[in-house]
């Protein structure tokens, strides 16, 4: 385990903070000439100054001259704004294809100084040990990364098989770790609604520890089931896609987390609860959920989400509240982060425009960590063990026949269930298509492509076949990935079964990642050797490979925005309507397995 960067608690330095604020002891750093944004009152204080000592704010007010000593560093901001560092209230580091260290390096220049991460991706592959590895690397970073203990591995018991399982004893153990802030999103909402003793025990262990329970109610039903879920204890939810969803959650005392990730564009439809209905914004939080490395390096992180909220008509100061103090208060950290006020960690951003939000300089714990888009600090890496790099076990070499969906004997054509991808949304559609049968095998045609889930945790050699539409792929291609939320088996989509086999075998060879093939050639490869989910290579390198992968998908005919994210969710059996797992097709509206073939056609 790496040694965390030393950072004093408030009790350790309270006397020094008081002495500096009173003028009896010098500050380490004083920022002058600032327009200080006070999200706690929604004010901008022109000409204010801040004094920092031991990485915390000691004085925030009109004149900090009494805090300046011979060794004090003084920086004149020249009338620019000083805002709190941005907080991401719900996210998965693994979705960035990066380790915590490289994720931090990627987002620090964008002004993200606090993250609340749920590593349930690695929990499905490596169990509690994987969570601990993520937690330990997170604690060594120069910014704040708190960990939520994953709640659901598997996410839907009985509908999928994971590499490891998480239970109440694991949750209770993790609650004693120093960086655990609460329970990760409670994805098994049918279990909570049905009174599952395991799910309620995990929630109880979290509340007993005085920590926050994350929610995940991925259903449009806002009737008794929703109310039962709210009664079960989740304190927030990020799965809303409409204004009605946001309002319902806030009325039940939950925080509505509205997200803008690489492919989830859910802010515009929900922020109208504030901008048009005029509801109290204290219970709304901006988050990203899932951002891949290309988005992080080229577009931004929480700054991108805040800019989008402002572009949707939100007052900039309210949007900043949703990305700072609201998040801090939700997790019980309003005395630590989320506002520029005495005693808090000196996490702050220098910007010249509150709407366009250029991130000109970033301070974390009173230290300049980024300027002009460059990260200026070291982000320590964990020494990831060998078994965390050896997680793709197919059991055998796969061939084209493994990706054949067999038709009922004697059928000339069949009506099959098809997973329908919805652009920029996590839910899918449950579609049907009439497909021909050739040589006893159901053939894909038109916009309907093959999809297969390849078991990769235990080397069983098992392949489950189905069909998917919406990607728009042309002939002769295949794409495979070991990122397949949440069970993280291997998902292969293609229009050529021979290419599907090549893609799957390639990922077994390199230890996981994403690969795109067409006409016998590999067009792109993103190696993700850690748990088949992440790379510890520099973020810029991973982002370049990810961009090449996106370009290869486009070359194969795909026009969807960030379609890789859609690909990665095809096995997510807790979001409607139709998914695929190692046990078969899953009708998520009923939380039950269903047949691929609806009927034979004459």
Image (spheres, rainbow, N blue to C red):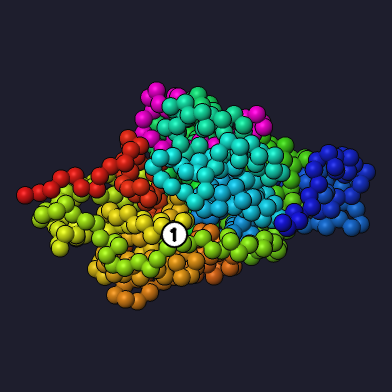
Where does the image place residue 301, in percent across and percent down from the top left? 54, 54
Residue 97 seen in the figure: no
- Residue at (61% x, 40% y) in the render: 170
Where does the image place residue 595, in percent across and percent down from the top left? 25, 44
Up-down: is 509 above or below 98? below
Q: Quadrant of the N terminus?
A: bottom right
User: Residue 210 colored magenta?
Assistant: yes
Up-down: is 190 above or below 533? above
Where does the image place residue 279, in percent across and percent down from the top left? 49, 29
> In the drawing, does residue 497 fall left or right of residue 136?
left
Number of marks in the rendered image = 1
Residue 231 seen in the figure: yes
- Residue at (32% x, 48% y) in the render: 584
- Residue at (42% x, 62% y) in the render: 394
Where does the image place residue 27, in percent across and percent down from the top left? 85, 50
Up-down: is 269 above or below 450? above
Q: Residue furthest right?
A: 24
Q: Residues within 10 Å of mark 1 (few under 14, many from 20)?
A: some
Snapshot quadrant of residue 246: top left
> In the drawing, does residue 408 fall left or right of residue 241?
left
Near-viewer residue (311 or 126): 126
Q: Residue furthest left?
A: 602
Near-viewer residue (498 or 371): 498
Near-viewer residue (73 or 331): 331
Q: Which residue is mark 1?
A: 459
What's the magenta region? 207-230
* Mark 1 element type: loop
Q: Residue furthest bottom?
A: 521
């Amino acid at each position: 385990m790496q040694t965390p960067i030393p950072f004093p608690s408030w009790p350790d330095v309270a006397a020094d903070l008081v002495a500096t604020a009173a003028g009896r002891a010098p500050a380490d750093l004083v920022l002058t000439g600032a327009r200080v944004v006070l999200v706690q009152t929604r004010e901008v204080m022109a000409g204010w100054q801040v004094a920092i000592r031991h990485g915390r704010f000691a004085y925030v007010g009109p004149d900090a001259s009494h805090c300046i000593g011979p060794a004090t560093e003084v920086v004149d901001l020249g009338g620019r704004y000083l805002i709190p560092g941005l907080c991401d209230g719900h996210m998965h580091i693994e979705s960035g294809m990066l380790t915590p260290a490289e994720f931090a390096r990627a987002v620090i220049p964008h002004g993200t100084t606090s993250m609340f991460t749920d590593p349930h991706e690695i929990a499905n592959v490596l169990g509690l040990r994987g969570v601990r590895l993520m937690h330990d690397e997170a604690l060594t970073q120069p910014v704040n990364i708190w960990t939520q203990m994953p709640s659901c591995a598997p996410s839907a018991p009985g509908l999928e098989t994971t590499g490891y399982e998480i239970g109440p004893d694991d949750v209770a153990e993790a609650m004693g770790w120093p960086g655990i802030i609460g329970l990760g999103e409670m994805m098994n909402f049918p279990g909570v609604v049905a009174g599952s003793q395991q799910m309620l025990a995990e929630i109880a262990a979290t509340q007993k520890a005085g920590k926050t329970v994350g929610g995940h109610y991925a259903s449009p039903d806002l009737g008794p089931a929703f109310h039962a879920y709210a009664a079960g204890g989740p304190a927030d939810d990020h799965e809303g896609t409409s204004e009605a969803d946001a309002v319902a959650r806030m009325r039940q005392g939950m925080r509505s987390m509205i997200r803008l990730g690489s492919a989830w564009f859910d802010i515009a439809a929900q922020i109208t609860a504030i901008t048009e209905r005029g509801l109290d914004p204290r219970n709304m939080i901006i988050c990203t959920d899932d951002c891949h490395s290309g988005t992080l390096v080229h577009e931004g992180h929480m700054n991108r989400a805040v800019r989008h909220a402002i572009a949707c008509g939100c007052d900039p100061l309210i949007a900043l509240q949703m990305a700072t103090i609201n998040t801090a208060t939700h997790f019980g950290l309003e005395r630590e982060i989320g506002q520029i006020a005495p005693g808090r960690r000196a996490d702050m951003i220098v910007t010249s425009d509150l709407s366009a939000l250029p991130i000109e300089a970033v301070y974390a714990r009173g230290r300049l960590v980024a300027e002009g888009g460059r990260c200026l600090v070291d982000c320590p890496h964990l020494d990831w063990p060998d078994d965390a790099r050896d997680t793709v076990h197919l059991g055998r070499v796969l061939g084209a026949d493994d990706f054949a969906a067999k038709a009922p004997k004697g059928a000339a054509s069949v009506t099959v269930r098809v997973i329908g991808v919805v652009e920029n949304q996590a839910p899918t559609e449950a579609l049907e298509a009439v497909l021909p049968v050739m040589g006893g095998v159901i053939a894909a045609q038109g916009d309907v492509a093959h999809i297969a889930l390849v078991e990769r945790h235990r080397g069983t050699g098992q392949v489950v076949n189905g069909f998917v539409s919406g990607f728009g792929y042309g002939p002769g291609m295949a794409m495979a990935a070991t990122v397949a939320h949440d069970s993280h088996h291997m998902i292969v989509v293609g229009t050529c079964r021979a290419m599907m086999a090549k893609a799957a075998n390639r990922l077994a060879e390199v230890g996981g990642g994403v690969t795109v093939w067409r006409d016998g050639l590999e067009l792109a490869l993103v190696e993700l050797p850690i748990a088949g989910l992440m790379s510890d290579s520099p973020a810029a390198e991973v982002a370049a490979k990810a961009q090449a992968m996106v370009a290869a998908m486009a070359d194969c005919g795909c026009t969807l925005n960030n379609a890789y994210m859609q690909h990665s969710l095809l096995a997510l059996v807790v979001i409607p309507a139709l998914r695929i797992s190692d046990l078969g097709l899953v009708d998520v509206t009923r939380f039950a397995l269903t047949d691929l073939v609806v009927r034979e056609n004459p």
